[in-house]
Image: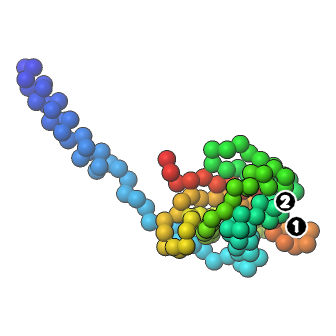
Amino acid sequence: MISLQLRVVASLTALLPAIARAQAPAPSAPIPSVALPRELDRVLRDYERAWQAGDAAALAALFTTDGFVLSNGKPAVRGHDAIRTAYQDAGGTLRLRALAYAVQDTLGYIIGAYGYGNDSDALDTGKFILALRRGGGGQWLIAGDIDNTNRR
């Protein structure tokens, strides 16, 4: 009886990796990018340029005066001074792409993905949501920037 139980346990133990592989979800294909209207695309391109230049002041200027940055694993920051401080170490080749967007009157959003490096075909490193508000001059500003990485 004990040897039968041991054989059953040994057989099940041997099958566990195969069962786990069969139940693991297949990696999904990346969500395709969408084209943004010029005034929204400007927000992403200005963000990329300021990030690549390591210009924390230019990054902060893309936000409303009461804007938020909610970065992965970090406390929330609010306002130009706090955003400038949070982005002091910005720099490197950042790629932003839009997955979806919407605008209505003075509010809008962009849902997107980001990566680093010059290879536009490289996998995304993370994703973001930009909550947008149209400023007094008609220019879209970031009211909230939420991002997180794809790493577990």
* Mark nearer the N terminus (2 vs 1): 2
- What is the spatial separation of the Cα atoms under label 2 and label 1, in whole angstroms? 8 Å
Answer with left or right where residue 98 lies relative to residue 80. Answer: left
Considering depth in this image, is 131 or 62 the residue closer to the camera?
62
Considering depth in this image, is 47 or 67 the residue closer to the camera?
47
At x 55%, y 68%, the residue is: 117
Looking at the rendered image, the quarter that the N terminus falls into is: top left
Q: What residue type is labelled 2?
A: Thr
Asked if one can make out residue 49 in the rendered structure from this viewpoint, the answer is: yes
Give the quarter of the image for residue 39: bottom right
- Where does label 1 land, which residue? 135
Q: Which residue lies furthest to the right in this view?
A: 136
At x 14%, y 36%, the residue is: 11
At x 71%, y 78%, the residue is: 37
Give the quarter of the image for residue 65: bottom right
Q: What residue type is labelled 1?
A: Gly
Q: Which mark is residue 53?
A: none
- Where does label 2 land, which residue? 64
Give the quarter of the image for residue 107: bottom right
Answer with left or right where residue 102 lies relative to residue 135. Answer: left
* On screen, residue 18 above or below 122: above
For the residues labelled 2 and 1, say whether their Cβ atoms are less than 8 Å apart.
yes
* On screen, residue 4 above or below 94: above
Answer with left or right where residue 66 lies relative to residue 19. Answer: right
Considering depth in this image, is 105 or 85 the residue closer to the camera?
85
Whole-percent x, y for residue 15 in the image: 20, 41
Whole-percent x, y for residue 38 in the image: 73, 79
At x 74%, y 45%, the residue is: 76
User: How is the rendered protein coloured?
Assistant: rainbow
Q: What element carries label 1?
A: loop
* On screen, residue 78 above or below 50: above
